[in-house]
Amino acid sequence: MKAMNYRGPFRVRVDEKPMPEILHPRDAIVQVTRACICGSDLHLYHGMVPDTRVGSTFGHEFIGIVRELGSGVTNLKVGDRVLVPFNIACGECIFCVQGLYANCHESNTMSTAAGGIFGYSHLAGGYDGGQAEYVRVPYADVGPTVIPEGMDEEDALLLTDVLPTGYQAAEMGGIQKGDTVVVFGAGPVGIMAAKCAWLFGAERVIVIDHLEYRLDFVKNYANCEVYNFKSIEDPVLFIKHITNWLGADVCIDAVGSDACGNALQTITGKKLLLQAGAATALHWAINSVKKGGIVSVVGVYGPTDNLIPIGNVLNKGITIRANQTSVKRLLPKLMQHVQDGILSPKDIITHRFALEEIPDAYRIFSSKLDECIKPVIVL
């Protein structure tokens, strides 16, 4: 089969790889019909995630058709169209039982932190991802969800990660009616977080980024205020100024380790790799939120350390909530929102590529060319 093949930082190609096989009774083989390139994939592409091995196939956002089932999978049948959450979760461990599918204790023996994730380095279990013609899906009796009749397949595709992550970002913020919410990052997840903030009762939603085309997009899609931090001398001071010097009720870090905007963070976190990525957005979130406010973190940081102002967290009485998204827990609600027309996630897709075009797709998305918001691989 054809599959994306990682050859080192900034180097990917499409190669022939062996067909995946059923290795356990709870496995399924899914023929991929659509896959996304995620902003988190760029962390891998840029060489910022440890133990990302040459030969890996990325891709944790994909949908497809069930082609083969292990004997232990009875809730699916061959031919089902399924969306596959990016979490690989057993459904039975103490964390899965609590709905913390992102923290499954069985799917990733490499780590005591994150659970298994498709196509996201050996730190996340070493599973091949869905930027390929076929993929092995472990615990297929748990994660894969049949796409409802009539649902657009690209809406379903964005239910595998982007929409749930944006929604959980807003949910973890504990947004109350009348709150002011600041979202750092106008990538796909930040766009969805801004959109979902309104569902929780926000009175004011503000998005900070440095790319005008992304700011224009989120302004139109999520009906929010937008500001370019490059035109602001001090984003923290600016946010304080526009919130009566109190700060925002909720700040969301939807950027993670690839953040721009601070030379020290960029040099130590992205160039020298002395910390787990540039924590610029997290700094701004902590310092921009009001006393007693909530900072929600869904931007990806690698292990193990970052330079953050923990003293400000303590002295301001801030609550920080962070996690990978437990997609399965949120799917029933979000699928209903999509079917009812409350949310239309496919509208953020701007580019579509064939599998053979993956090198160009990564280059365009990484370099922010052609006003690319969300690229999809069509198989």
Image (cartoon, helix red, strand yellow):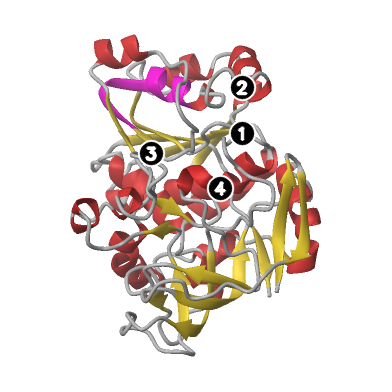
Please report the residue visible at 55 percent of the width from the left and 46 percent of the height from the top. Answer: 121
Alpha carbons under labels 4 and 2: distance apart: 31 Å
Region in magenta: 282-295
Please report the residue visible at 75 percent of the width from the left and 56 percent of the height from the top. Answer: 361
Sequence-first tag of 1 and 4: 1
Q: Which of marks 1 and 4 is in front?
A: 1
Q: Which quadrant, please, contains the C terminus?
A: bottom right
Name the disc covering residue 204, or none: 3
Disc 1 residue type (three-letter):
Met
How dense is the environment of label 2, judged by Cα within 10 Å: few (below 14), some, or many (20 and up)? some
Disc 2 residue type (three-letter):
Leu
Q: In the rendered image, which residue does mark 1 sit on?
A: 48
Describe residue 180's horizontal placement relative to residue 194 as left or right: left
Q: Evaluate whether residue 371 shows in this view.
A: no
Residue 70 screen position, x and y as percent: 40, 81
Q: In the rendered image, which residue does mark 4 sit on?
A: 218
Sequence-first tag of 4 and 2: 4
Q: Which quadrant, please, contains the N terminus?
A: bottom right
Q: Is residue 322 above or below residue 139?
A: above
SS under mark 2? loop
SS under mark 1? loop
Q: Nearer the viewer, residue 242 or 373?
A: 373
Q: Quadrant of the rendered structure where residue 354 is?
A: bottom right
How dense is the environment of label 4, judged by Cα within 10 Å: few (below 14), some, or many (20 and up)? many
Residue 285 screen position, x and y as percent: 42, 25
Q: Nearer the viewer, mark 4 or mark 2?
A: 2
Residue furthest front as drawn: 23
Sequence-first tag of 3 and 2: 3
Sequence-first tag of 3 and 1: 1
SS under mark 4? helix
